[in-house]
Image (cartoon, helix red, strand yellow):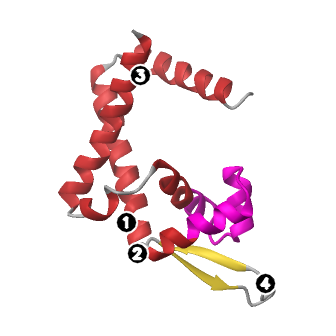
Amino acid sequence: MMEIVLIEFIDTLDASLKKLQREAGVAAGFANLTISQFQYIDAVQALGSPAVSEIADRLQISKASATTGVNKLIKRGYLTKSQSEQDRRVFHVQLTAAGQQLIGAKYQALAEYEAFALGALTLEEAAQFQTILMKLIDRFKGA
């Protein structure tokens, strides 16, 4: 039973993001991104203008894997790469306008989903829900 509920919950989050993307007229490009590719874009956004090695560290993957993932997203138009002026061996990764649009759509969808959830729950239930999610996240991360 819990498995079914979790799948439904994840599916509703995914549907919320895709609906917002369709409404924004950007579904064609976003619809084909994998979860892993979203994680790369999130990492670049969170880190600012990271080197590929910083992305690899954040995602806990090899630098070679990070390079491959970044290059795929460059080809798709979500990221760009520029050579460091201080160390010519280092390349920094930035979001393109499309990458920034994706991040904006993601946070808008999350805000809408949060408003929907808060409208369906009492304040006490919302607090309990957040506590439960944080406990699961901490457990998953091994904290």
Element on which disc 2 rests: helix
Can you say whether 117 is above or below 25 in the image?
above
Image quadrant occupied by the N terminus = top left
> Residue at horizontal 53%, vertical 56%?
42
Which of pointers 3 and 4 lies earlier in the amino acid sequence? 3
User: At label 3, which amino acid type do we have?
Assistant: Leu
Residue at x 43% of width, y 67% of height: 100
Sequence-wise, which precedes: disc 2 or disc 3?
Answer: 3
Q: Earlier in the sequence, mark 4 or mark 1?
A: 4
For the residues labelled 3 and 4, say whether their Cβ atoms are less than 8 Å apart. Answer: no
Question: Alpha-carbon neighbours of circle 1 within 10 Å: few (<14), some, or many (≥20)?
Answer: some
In the structure shown, which secondary structural element does the residue marked by tag 4 occupy? Answer: loop
- The dot on residue 101 is 1
Q: In this view, does 143 lie to the left or right of 75?
A: right
Tag 1 secondary structure: helix
Q: Name the residue tied to disc 2.
A: 97
Tag 1–tag 2 contact (CB < 8 Å): yes
Could you say which disc has been placed on residue 89 in the image?
A: 4
The quarter of the picture where the C terminus appears is top right
Vertically, is 137 above or below 18?
above
The alpha-carbon separation of the residues under discs 2 and 3 comes to 33 Å
- Circle 3 is placed at which residue position? 6
In the rendered structure, the answer to whether residue 13 lies left or right of residue 3 reads left
Q: What residue type is labelled 4?
A: Arg
Question: Is residue 123 visible in this depiction of the protein?
Answer: no
Distance between the alpha carbons at the discs numbered 4 and 1: 29 Å
Give the mark nearer the N terminus: 3 vs 1. Answer: 3
- Choose mark 2 or mark 3, whichever is in front: 3
Q: Which mark is in front, 3 or 1?
A: 3
Is residue 112 depicted above or below 47 in this figure? above
